[in-house]
Image: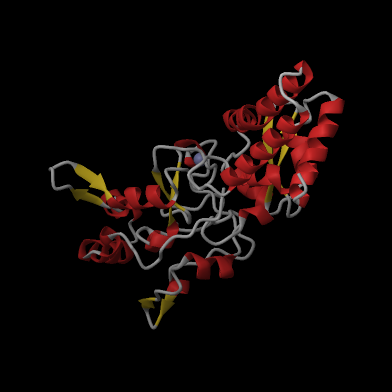
Amino acid sequence: MRKVVKDLKNIPASLVSQEAIDSLQNIIDTRNNDLIKSDIYRGKYLKANGSKGDEVVEKLAKIYHGKCAYCEERTLIYIEHYRPKGRVQKAKHSGYFWLCYEWTNLLPTCHECNKIGGGKADQFPVSNKHLTYDDCLTNQQIDSVKIKATYLNSKEAPFLLHPEIDEPKDFLAFEIDANKNGVSMIGIDGIGGRGDKTISICNLNRQPLLLNRLNYINDYVNTKIKKLFAKLSKGSIPKETFREEMKELFQELDSHKTDEKRTFTLLRWFVMESADNFHKLAISSLPKNEQEVALAFFKAYKNGTL
Ligand SMILES: [Zn+2]
């Protein structure tokens, strides 16, 4: 998960169309969640060439660079209602039907993070109490401020992080998981805190994700450093070239962590954040003496003296 900025003024047309207004009124009047139209919250439209498109999906894909809002893997986009539209698991709640077409409630996710059984689905635990439709009214009318995720989060204090509101770096970290042979995500705001809960709600430590994170570490970090040490020990590069290439590698890794188009940017940032993180995640599989050299180079790089 990474912090994402969504333009809240650039709302997809279908979400504010007359059809959406009429549909929402109908849902409110009947309290029938089955009347929620996926064509509206997906933004179905006819393209000039006659083919069909989904404006909301396309806009979210652009904002999130084709990645899942929760796991940060590249994906076919599914529209996720951050606050579940139909029902809320383990709560006596109707589901947030009045937010079915609300732009701040729509996120792009992969199938795995949001699936029923093993994914988020209609989970939405909160620290305070779940708000109701009536809580979002002013003078019997829907209040445009009270349906925004920022307002609702301030009142309900949900456990699930919202990538457009929360800073994931404050809640999530990574560690090598020796048992599962991968890289696990861990919560850092206390046991049972928002980090922990977000990981469990979206199943962010499922085996394929652990392995894909490890592949990033191996492919982009570990393997390159191993090759440099191999070249150095064979004498095929002088020490000065080794130093230059290590510096170039660190610069490359630094540029990747801010490149929103890449997968796992939170992990990329975390690895480069401190000598301790770099040591534990990137080079702990190297021989001891190489670990020490690589770590010294990393520290020098961070100090600006490499
Ligand atoms: Zn995902």
Corner quadrant of residue 22: bottom left
Q: Is residue 229 left or right of residue 143?
A: right
Q: Nearer the viewer, residue 301 or 21?
A: 301
Q: Nearer the viewer, residue 43 or 49?
A: 49
- Residue name at image x 43 percent, y 46 percent: 65
In the picture as drawn, the residue positioned furthest to the top comes out as 234
Image coords of residue 56 (percent x, y): 33, 52
In this rendering, is residue 183 above or below 22?
above
Which color scheme is applied?
secondary structure
Residue 166 visible within the image: yes
Q: Is residue 1 left or right of residue 137?
A: right
In this rendering, is residue 218 above or below 259?
above
Residue 186 visible within the image: no
Image coords of residue 93 (percent x, y): 49, 58
Image coords of residue 167 (percent x, y): 61, 58
Q: Nearer the viewer, residue 197 or 139?
A: 197
Q: Nearer the viewer, residue 289 or 194?
A: 289
Image coords of residue 95 (percent x, y): 45, 57
- Residue name at image x 71 percent, y 48 percent: 273
Corner quadrant of residue 155: bottom right
Q: Is residue 87 left or right of residue 273?
A: left
